[in-house]
């Protein structure tokens, strides 16, 4: 990586921007005249090397939570991996030249930043970032923050603990693929089951699932086996509650929650990533990037098109970012 000690930050940069809400494929435009964001005293300026897409990026552009969103024009993007090029007066944890990663929006749906990560530079609070694990590339690191923090927080909220069993709905997706790994490697699950379509059953097993359920052929709620926890990453809480043991917990990250299922929205922190870094560095947890899921910055619209298919395994990453 280049040295950033005597690095000159440009005044104008390239970023993907939408001035009105709608399908990102229709409203996103590449703008070469965007101002570099000013940093506050608790923020750092990051030269973006890679950024990943999440379903929330498309939902946000479509206006699903416009009442609590920032106003357009908006540069989308939550996840970032890059290099610190400037620090605010109060920043203690990082210095210029540090390689970092994180989800730049503390509250996923509550006024996320106008200037996100699909840009050459982004400003972010130091408390939301962690040092990039040394063994991971920027692409691998960018794929992780929102998904791994969501996976981890959901397992904590479900009071998951060693010896418990879990069913993951949507095990091949960005969050689900990490729930499987975390449940097994970090939380000490006794048994992990997960659902996917026919072609992804072997992929689930490669992540550590003991039981891979083909949702196109069987209804998971009709299985005789019930689970201590069901982690619903697809929005099927009404069915999920039929697959949990009495006294067990169901968490969902999509759609409305049918009680006793609990819906939660991520609160992002760098400390969660710091806690998980040793598992990433020891390769007990591995980033999951779709085989067709790395797109250059110029092909961001194609990346959103691919996200829209709903057939992505793991994550989509934009790299390199000029």
Image: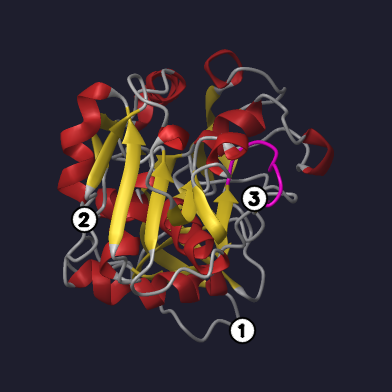
x then y, percent, for residue 90: 61, 84
Q: Earlier in the sequence, mark 1 or mark 3?
A: 1
SS for callout 2: loop
Q: Which residue is mark 2?
A: 137
Of tags 2 and 1, the one toward the viewer is 2
x then y, percent, for residue 32: 51, 31
Q: Which residue is mark 3?
A: 261
The alpha-carbon separation of the residues under discs 3 and 2 comes to: 37 Å
Q: Is residue 205 left or right of residue 101?
A: left
Locate residue 125: give its quadrant. Answer: bottom right
Residue 51 highlighted magenta (yes or no): no
From which residue to which does the magenta span run? 253-262
Q: Which residue is mark 1?
A: 90
> Can residue 65 be seen at all in this image of the molecule?
yes
SS for callout 1: loop
Please name the residue shown 28% across and 31% down the image. Answer: 293
Q: Mark 3 and mark 1 in contact (Cβ < 8 Å)?
A: no
The alpha-carbon separation of the residues under discs 1 and 3 comes to: 41 Å
Query: Exactly how many numbered labels are in the figure?
Result: 3
| Quadrant holding the C terminus | top left
Nearer-the-camera pick, 47 or 161? 161
């Amino acid at each position: 990586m280049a040295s950033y000690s005597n690095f000159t930050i440009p005044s104008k940069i390239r970023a993907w921007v939408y001035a009105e809400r709608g399908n990102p494929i229709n409203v996103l435009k590449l703008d070469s005249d965007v101002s570099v964001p000013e940093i506050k005293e608790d923020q750092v300026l990051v030269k973006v090397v890679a950024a990943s897409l999440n379903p929330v990026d498309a939902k946000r552009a479509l206006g699903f939570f416009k009442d609590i969103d920032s106003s357009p024009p908006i540069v989308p993007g939550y996840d970032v991996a890059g290099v610190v090029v400037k620090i605010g007066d109060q920043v203690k944890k990082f210095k210029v030249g540090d390689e970092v990663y994180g989800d730049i929006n503390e509250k996923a749906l509550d006024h996320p930043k106008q200037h996100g990560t699909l840009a050459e530079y982004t400003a972010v609070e130091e408390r939301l970032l962690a040092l990039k694990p040394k063994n991971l590339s920027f692409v691998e690191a960018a794929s992780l923050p929102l998904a791994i923090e969501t996976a981890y927080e959901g397992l904590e909220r479900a009071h998951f603990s060693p010896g418990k069993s879990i069913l993951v709905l949507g095990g091949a997706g960005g969050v689900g693929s990490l729930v499987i790994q975390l449940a097994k490697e970090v939380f000490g699950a006794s048994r992990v089951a997960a659902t996917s379509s026919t072609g992804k059953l072997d992929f689930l097993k490669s992540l550590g699932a003991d039981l891979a359920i083909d949702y196109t052929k069987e209804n998971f709620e009709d299985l005789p086996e019930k689970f201590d926890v069901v982690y619903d990453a697809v929005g099927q809480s009404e069915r999920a509650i039929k697959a949990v043991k009495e006294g067990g917990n169901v968490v969902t990250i999509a759609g409305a929650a049918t009680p006793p299922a609990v819906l939660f929205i991520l609160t992002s922190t760098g400390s969660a990533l710091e806690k998980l870094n040793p598992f990433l560095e020891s390769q007990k947890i591995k980033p999951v990037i779709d085989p067709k899921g790395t797109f250059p910055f110029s092909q961001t619209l194609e990346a959103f098109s691919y996200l829209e298919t709903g057939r992505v395994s793991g994550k989509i990453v934009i790299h390199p970012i000029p």
